[in-house]
Image (cartoon, grey):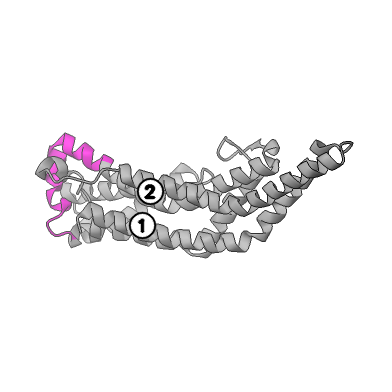
Amino acid sequence: MVELFEYTTATWTCWLLVFTRISGAMMVLPIFSSSVIPMRIKTAIAALIALCVAPIALSSSTGGGTLEMGQLIATPLAGAVSICGELAIGWVLGATAAILMWGAHLGGQLIGQDSGLAFGQVVDPTTGQSNTPTSTLMTIFAGLVFLALEGHRLVILALCGSFDSVPPGSIGKILLTGIPVETATEVTREIGGQTWLLGLQIAFPASVALLVTTIGLGILARMIPEMNVFAVGFAVRTGVGMLALFMTLPFIADLFGVVVNTGLEGSQLILDRIGGS
């Protein structure tokens, strides 16, 4: 910690890069990215974590980007690339954990559309967006599972450990040494695909139950033409959708646990590929 308070260009540049990566992760991390938490609190948390991690990253790096901190500052273009690169790395690492919340929100939206609860869309005061009741329910449930699995602690530990695989300032070496980096296309495609896969897995049981209910209502309408299928079907579909959702919640919780573990493993694979190991 004494090294951090030595007013050297390399020390404070390292702290800035560490702070930028952690801030990028805070933008999308579950719980931490919630708009309920004031921005000042998020900034203070990121600065405090960076204050603890920066001396370790600076002292443990051997031949990495931290050895060229002075060059990064002396070269504005390289410094800008380093800062943007750290922000992008942090966002990607946070996105591997945010797949849990995005998938839960998508699954809730699909269930709400099928069950008719989408008619109850209201504006969420925390996000300013309109959400169905089922998407709000699934998002809250995903957040509780994430906390119960100690995902917040594991994600922060993985984020702090990321500086061993990819030292601060490594992205800035592109202009200094010409080291190529992997394109973000594959990572973006994988994150989007996993989000859709999780959402479909969450909504699949309820969607199948609602499809069978719709077919049954159609047959019943042909048998009893006098019945108001729209009025009866709306209540029936809503009840079946909520029943199927609550019956599958234990299995969804297990699925969330798998997603959290897979996200942590995926973030390490991404770091290994960026670090060239």
Where residue 91 sits: x, y (%)?
Answer: 36, 46
What residue lies at 19% left-to-right and 39% top-to-bottom? 79
Q: Which residues are magenta?
A: 61-84
Q: Mainly helix, strand or loop, the magenta region?
A: helix
251 or 128: which is nearer to us? 251
In the depicted view, which residue is nearer to us: 209 or 7? 209
Tell me which amino acid carries mark 2.
Glu
Relative height, residue 125 to residue 69 (above, below): above
Position in image of residue 215 (x %, y %): 73, 45
Residue 157 lies left or right of residue 137; in this view the side is: left
Q: Which residue is mark 1?
A: 266
- Dots 2 and 1: beta carbons under 8 Å? yes
- Return the residue nearer the eye: 274 or 195: 195
Disc 2 is placed on an element classified as helix
Q: Quadrant of the C terminus?
A: bottom left
Residue found 12% across the figure and 38% down from its top: 74
Whether residue 41 is visible to the viewer of this picture, yes or no, is: yes
- Residue at 32% x, 59% y is 268
